[in-house]
Amino acid sequence: MTVDRSIWQKTEDYDDDVKLDRKEKNKMKKMDKEKKKEILPSMIKNKEKRSAVHAKLKHQKKVEKRKRLKTRDAEEKHALELGEEPPARKIPRTIENTRELDETVCQPDDEELFAGNDADEFSSILKRELPPKILITTSRFNSTRGPAFISELLEVIPNAHYYKRGTYDLKKIVEYAKKQDFTSLIVVHTNRREPDALLIIGLPDGPTAHFKLSRLVLRKDIKNHGNPTSHDPELVLTNFTTRLGHRIGRLIQSLFPQEPNFRGRRVVTFHNQRDYIFFRHHRYIFETKESKNSDSKAKKGKDGKVERITQQKVIARLQECGPQFTLKLRSLQHGTFDTKGGEYEWVHKPEMDTSRRRFFL
């Protein structure tokens, strides 16, 4: 009786496949059991135990991150020793670098944009033909923190003057400011004893920008704050990339003189990030620090002791002068303030917030 060897081979292969399937199933079962055993902090009702588990998981993540960084640095060092190019570092995905493409983003070779700059409402100030002169006032119902905020604004913006609002309408204030040759008007609006909005009106022909104001921190509440001097500050505007952002940037730029006094070391920053404009006011300070080093090559004195060589290093640091606040553009209107017959260049509406990666400034 003869048995076909091919049949035996097929049965053996079938048995091997079955064994592999069983091993894979057992692995999957083990993984499922481990996942079930893993207890998430949100599943623990006891507050102390929950915080302990959360701290342990956080520590594990830090350790894993350090290991990844060490291996990456070792690979880069090894590649440099061999004379090869190190592997490219991965760029983390953020909301900013995954921003949706917008047709209104300004390009460096946009001739139409730069040609329009010479004819817009801010050209005379930005060309230094006319010095900026700012009038600051409040809404009719003022608050306790409003005057403190305005007094700090007067120190931030050079050549700014405060006038009490009283019972005057805003249109009459605009007409008065035009006659007195003011170039801009800032209205600080308050609600529930807290400044919550800014209205910036360019004079004499507009435009009018309405900003929501939030996260206000006065100078006295900033730790280790400094007091600003009377020097004209340097102005830093960052990330105003679209045509609307370019226009808002020029409106803010027209509030400050275009000849900063660098001896004062004052810097005023308007940083746009995800359509939120963050305001900061700093002074940069240069300090010299001495560091003592004792090397083997250092000279020995008569007593046989090593003489320490002192080295001086210049260190630059920032000191915040305050205030801190955040602006969010609500509308941009043609001309001066007019709620009834005014035409709007841009108005924020809730329907526009369709994506987290869509920005307007």
Image (cartoon, grey):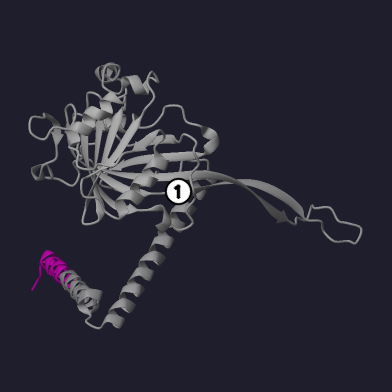
Looking at the picture, tell me which residue is in the foreground, 29 or 356: 356
Q: Is residue 86 left or right of residue 1?
A: right
> In the figure, residue 67 lies in which quadrant?
bottom left
In this view, 189 is above or below 24: above
**Residue 207, horizontal then vertical, whole percent:** 21, 28
- Foreground: 114 or 340? 340
| Quadrant in the rendering for residue 30 | bottom left
Q: Quadrant of the C terminus?
A: top left
What percent of the width, then of the height, locates residue 81? 55, 46
Q: Main secondary structure of the magenta part?
A: helix
Residue 70 as seen in the image, left or right of residue 24:
right
Position of residue 320 measured from the top left corner of the image (x, y, whole percent): 45, 49
Q: Which residue, as the protein is rendered here, is positioned at the far front? A: 167
User: Which is more toward the observer, 298 or 82?
Assistant: 298
Residue 295's place in the image compared with 272, above or below, is below
Provide the residue span drawn in magenta: 1-19
Q: Secondary structure at mark 1?
A: loop
- State the image coordinates of residue 83 (x, y, percent, origin top left): 52, 40
Q: Indicate the amino acid at tag 1.
A: Cys
Q: Residue furthest right?
A: 302
Q: Which residue is mark 1?
A: 321
| Mark 1 residue crowding within 10 angstroms, few (<14) / some (14–19) / many (20+) | many
Q: Residue at horizontal 45%, vertical 48%?
A: 321
Q: Is residue 170 highlighted in magenta?
A: no
Number of numbered markers = 1
Residue drawn at the location 72% of the way across and 55% of the way down: 293
Q: Residue at x 20, y 29 (%)?
A: 104
Q: Is residue 52 visible?
A: yes
On-image quarter of the N terminus: bottom left
Q: Is residue 97 visible?
A: no
